[in-house]
Amino acid sequence: GGMLPEGADAVTPFEDVEEQTDTILIDKPIEAGSCLGLEGEDIKIGETILQNGTFLHAGHIGAAASIGIGELECYEKPVVAVGVSGDEIAEIGETLGPGEVYDTNSYTLSAVVFKSGGVAEKLPIVRDSVEQIEEALSSSNADIITFTGGSSVGERDLIVDAIRNLGEVIFHGITVKPGKPTLLGKVGEKLVLGMPGYPTSCLTIANVLLTPMLRKMSRSEYKADSNLVEATLSETVTSKSASHQVIPVKLSNGTVKTVFKGSSVITSMSNADGYIELPDGISEIKAGEMVSVTLL
């Protein structure tokens, strides 16, 4: 990396030189200009090295540093407050009481947020109380608040009631299975995404709705088909539901099989490599057909 001495027009690697007493022996021909880095040969004056909206990787950072730029103006990562509600939910590390389960959704959602370009802030567990949910919604300064549990379409619509008291419910209930009781609301400038408490339902909606939201907000490159692979279905999949179905699957040697065991069990997703979709109106996909698998 040193300056070329005056009068020289090439450099030869040290390993190609044999040192003698007061001379060196070079047994390979050297062409003029060999092993030289010329001024301006990489980045020229006036050349654009980064476009507005570029999703930065290490090479971009290095290019900026090479011309003396140590700071770049970037979009902030969206902050997502991750909340769970339920009298039966216990923190990891606590001793489970009768009927209690460990908090799963905070951890799976935080992982989805991180992977999707956001920053997750885990909220304390909220009990089944409209007042506690309202307090959590009001006190958070996040861009998005996610809440799992308490959003079922029934008598105890706790999150729905809390959002209506503080803001507006944009929609409640979608024709997606699993994940039917999903809701979207707004409290001030904050979006609130209410998801089912069942782990598989929750993670499914996070992949289908939360990930695209975060990619859009963070200006990250997001192409719906960028993580799709084609595979042969090893078994016939049928549906009696009128909903759009999202089905976790396992890939093996170009074939795919379903691993869904139920909305309430997390292993439906932990054993999956991705998911396939069975749109509303399609009741069957036969074994041997090619399907598109969205990788997790």
Image (spheres, grey):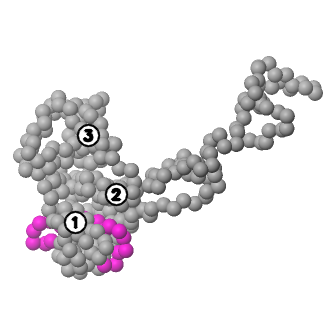
Q: Is residue 2 visible?
A: yes
Residue that mark 3 sits on = 293
The answer to which of 250 and 38 lies nearer the viewer is: 38
> Mark 1 against mark 2, which lies toward the viewer?
2
Q: In which quarter of the image is the N terminus?
A: top right
The x, y position of residue 38, in whole percent, is 70, 39
* 109 in relation to 289, above or below: below
Residue that mark 1 sits on = 184
**Which contiguous range is marked in magenta?**
138-157
Amino acid type at mark 1 = Leu
Mark closest to the chain's N terminus, 2 or 3: 2
Quarter holding residue 114: bottom left
**Element under disc 2:** helix
The x, y position of residue 74, in whole percent, is 48, 60
For disc 1, the neighbor class at 10 Å (few under 14, some 14 to 19, many from 20) is some
* 139 in relation to 226, above or below: below
For disc 2, the neighbor class at 10 Å (few under 14, some 14 to 19, many from 20) is some
Mark closest to the chain's N terminus, 3 or 1: 1
Residue that mark 2 sits on = 216
The answer to which of 84 and 53 lies nearer the viewer is: 53
Q: Residue at x 22, y 62 (%)?
A: 195
Quarter holding residue 29: top right
For disc 3, the neighbor class at 10 Å (few under 14, some 14 to 19, many from 20) is many
